[in-house]
Amino acid sequence: MAKKGKPKKNNPYILGVIPARFASTRLMGKPLADIGGKSLLQHTYEGASKSKLLDKIIIAVDDEQVAKAAKGFGASTIMTPKECPTGSDRIAIVAKESPRADIIVNIQGDEPFISGMMIDQAIEPLLFDPEVNVSTLAKLIETVDEFESSSVVKVVFDYKNFALYFSRSPIPFVREAKTQKEMLEKANIYKHIGLYVYRKDSLIKFTQLESTDLEQWEKLEQLRMLENGFKIKIVETEFDSFSVDTPEDLETARKIYSKLKKIELAK
């Protein structure tokens, strides 16, 4: 994997981890779901493999079927317990078993259109600012549907690009706007893209903390970090992503893939 994008001084070892849980509650066997002849997991892995900054990618599995499939397309795997409460806990297990790793990238296993450039954008703050311990991505919201959807997590951040809050509710509220559409026209409103980069000790510390009230109410792990004083650097990106959580999402992903293939063939 290429390393030419890394700064030469103090070269950290950067490990990408893809958590792949077989028994998803809303889409059983999700990592192996087919999109255009390849599994969802393989699409995610191949997209992540285009990163110029990752030294290695490991898929954190909890099922032999997924492990076999991952090895079939050349991926390294580590078996993790089925009872891991979150993807972050699964990633922390891999981090503890990877003594060389300085920086851990949590690459969601249900993002078939993730790009290497997005991953590199998220990593960069930790390479150039020693005070940044956690980073993630955000993109401008362009449609009212996204703004209103509780499945699309919104994020607000300060002038130094550190997160103030994440919510499933439409935030911020623009008082002078009469409609949601007008809110989007008057303000820069961002959605969160769930790719996280951690210094290893910050990841392990985070996963050792008890779940918090805001985390439970919103069902957003990152609020546990904010409630415990972690600072999360927000990197603005122009790239979009799509998460597959339900059978309906899977059908949408297949349609997106089909359109992308047609565009590729037309070039």
Image (cartoon, rainbow, N blue to C red):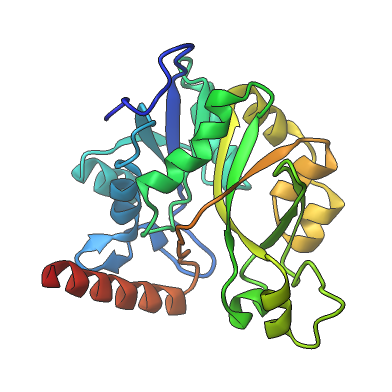
Up/down of 256 relative to 98, above or below: below
Of residue 265 and residue 176, the one placed in the foreground of this image is: 176
Up/down of 212 relative to 58, above or below: below
Q: Quadrant of the C terminus?
A: bottom left
Image location (x, y in percent) of residue 130:
64, 21
> Within the image, what quadrant is residue 73 found in?
top left
Image location (x, y in percent) of residue 64:
34, 45
Image location (x, y in percent) of residue 121:
48, 41
- Evaluate whether residue 83 shows in this view: no
Of residue 156 and residue 218, the one placed in the foreground of this image is: 156
Residue at 50% x, 67% y: name it. Answer: 245
Image location (x, y in percent) of residue 25:
54, 65
Of residue 31 and residue 190, the one placed in the foreground of this image is: 190
> Within the image, what quadrant is residue 141 found in?
bottom right
Count of numbered marks:
0
Q: Quick check: 42 left or right of 101?
A: left
Of all residues shown, which one is farthest toward the bottom? 178
Up/down of 124 relative to 37, above or below: above
